[in-house]
Image (cartoon, rainbow, N blue to C red):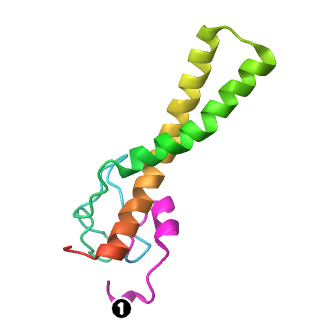
Amino acid sequence: MSDAFGPPPSPFVTGLRGRCPQCGVGRLFDGYLSVREICESCGAALSEHDTGDGPAVFVIFILGAAVVPLALAVEAAFGPPMWLHAVLWSAVILGGTLALLRRLKGVMVALHYRHRGPGS
C-alpha cells in the first residue's frame, strides 16, 4: 500500500461500496462478481486477491440464521401450505443472496488486500 494516498481506507467501507481497497475511489468489480485486474484510479493490482468460497459461506450462514427462524415463525403463526413456504423462502433466499454476495466478496477482497498485501 502506498503512502501517496494517505491512510488506507477501511476495508469494510470500501468492500461494501465495491471500491478499490487501496485508494477507495476506483471500482473493485468488473461485472457482478469479477474483480478488476487493476484499479483505474490508482493502478493497484486487484485480481490477485482471491476470496475463494468465503463470501458464499458467509451468505449461507447469514441467510440461514435469518430465514430459518422467520420460516418457523410464519409456520407457527399462519400455517401456510408447503408450496407457499417453498415459493416465499426461495424468493427471500435468492434476493438475499444477490444483495449480499457482491458486498461480502468486496469486503473479503479488501481484507485480503489489507492483511496479505499485493503479491502475497
Q: Which residue is drawn at the image coordinates 41% and 58% (left, top)?
A: 106
The answer to whether 37 appears left or right of 79 in the picture is left
Q: Which residue is drawn at the image coordinates 32% and 83% (left, top)?
A: 1
Residue 8 is inside the magenta segment: yes
The answer to whether 104 appears left or right of 91 in the picture is left
> What residue is shown with label 1?
4
Q: How far from the left and from the top, in percent, is residue 92?
A: 58, 30
Tell me the SS state at disc 1. Answer: helix
Where residue 87 sits, quadrant-wise, is: top right
Where residue 6 sits, quadrant-wise, is: bottom left
Position of residue 98 relative to residue 38, above or below, is above
Q: Amino acid at mark 1?
A: Ala
What's drawn in magenta, residue-wise?
Answer: 1-21
Q: Which residue is drawn at the image coordinates 50% and 67% (left, top)?
A: 12
Which residue occupies the extreme left position in the image? Answer: 119
Q: How far from the left and from the top, in percent, is residue 14?
A: 47, 67
Seen from the viewer's position, the closer of residues 98 and 68 is: 68
Q: How far from the left and from the top, in percent, is residue 109?
A: 36, 62
For residue 30, say whether it is visible: yes
For residue 41, say whether it is visible: no
Residue 89 is inside the magenta segment: no
